[in-house]
């Protein structure tokens, strides 16, 4: 959709942080959701940032050394990293639908998200072949029973137990598209990103991303998660 005030707030803080340290701003089009992505949104976002003087150094129509900057054109990079995970036995096919997970007695996080209970983790080759004839699988990574902790540049210390708090998470969807968690890790590493500024609603995704950086042998950036902008009645100012 169109940029909202929260997007612009993060963009401003990221721009100021980068420019105060002589850094570059990368404008990346995270268009993994093909059904909801429209070119008019992309062009309007560029116009909005340009009108506010939040100019970028890489990406957009200008391109740069790490092109392409549209995630929909970067699947080859994601496939290469997914192949590494598969070769090490860290991935498995999952045939569960979102509706099935919500209907099951799976644990839920405080924000309502389902913690994957490992339903397809132990499928046999025969079961996988049988289920594949009915529907294409998504691919999940096997997370260990491990606590991943880091210090956020704004919010301070934060930690999550991967198995308990998120469970095995999707890295490639059943439609063949790649999941946000894998794509941003691969892109930030390959594009040399050293600092990420984003909303606090993404704080809980950071431990699993840090785990992916580590298992893939990639260098992780610093993270700064900003408070969400709220209306007077407490509603999030979002899309």
Image (tube, rainbow, N blue to C red):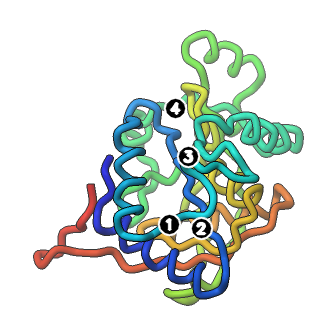
The residue most toward the left is 233
Dot 2 surroundings within 10 Å: few (below 14), some, or many (20 or more)? many
Q: Is residue 200 shown to the viewer in this render?
A: no
Percent from the top left, x then y, of residue 80? 81, 39
Residue pointed to by mark 2: 25
Q: CA distance from mark 4 to mark 3?
A: 39 Å
Residues marked 4 and 3 touching at CB (< 8 Å)? no
Q: Earlier in the sequence, mark 1 or mark 2?
A: 2
Q: In front of the other: label 2 or label 3?
A: 3
Label 4 vs 3, first from the N-terminus: 3
Query: What numbered label is drawn on residue 61?
Result: 3
- Upstream in sequence: badge 4 or badge 1: 1
Badges 1 and 2: C-beta atoms under 8 Å apart? Answer: yes
Q: Quadrant of residue 81?
A: top right
Q: Which mark is residue 96?
A: 4
Front of the two marks 1 and 2: 1
User: Is residue 137 shown to the viewer in this render?
Assistant: yes
Q: Residue at x 36, y 69 (%)?
A: 52
Q: Is residue 180 left or right of residue 239?
A: right
Q: Which mark, by number, is residue 17?
A: none
């Amino acid at each position: 959709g169109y940029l909202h005030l929260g997007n612009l707030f993060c963009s401003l803080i990221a721009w100021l942080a980068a420019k105060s340290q002589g850094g570059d701003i990368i404008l990346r089009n995270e268009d993994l959701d093909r059904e909801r992505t429209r070119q008019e949104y992309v062009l309007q976002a560029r116009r909005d940032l340009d009108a506010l003087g939040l100019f970028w150094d890489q990406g957009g129509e200008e391109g740069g050394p790490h092109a392409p900057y549209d995630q929909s054109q970067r699947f080859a990079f994601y496939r290469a990293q997914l192949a590494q995970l598969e070769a090490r036995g860290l991935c498995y096919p999952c045939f569960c639908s979102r509706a099935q997970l919500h209907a099951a007695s799976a644990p839920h996080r405080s924000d309502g998200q389902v913690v994957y209970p490992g339903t397809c983790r132990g499928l046999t080759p025969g079961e996988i072949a049988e289920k594949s004839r009915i529907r294409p699988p998504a691919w999940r990574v096997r997370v260990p029973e491990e606590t991943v902790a880091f210090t956020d540049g704004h919010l301070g210390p934060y930690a999550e137990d991967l198995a308990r708090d998120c469970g095995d998470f999707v890295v490639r969807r059943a439609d063949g598209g790649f999941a946000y968690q894998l794509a941003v890790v691969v892109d930030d590493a390959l594009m040399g990103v050293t600092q990420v500024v984003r909303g606090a609603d993404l704080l809980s995704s950071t431990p699993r991303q840090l785990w992916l950086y580590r298992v893939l042998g990639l260098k992780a950036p610093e993270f700064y998660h900003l408070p969400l902008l709220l209306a007077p009645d407490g509603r999030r100012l979002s899309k």
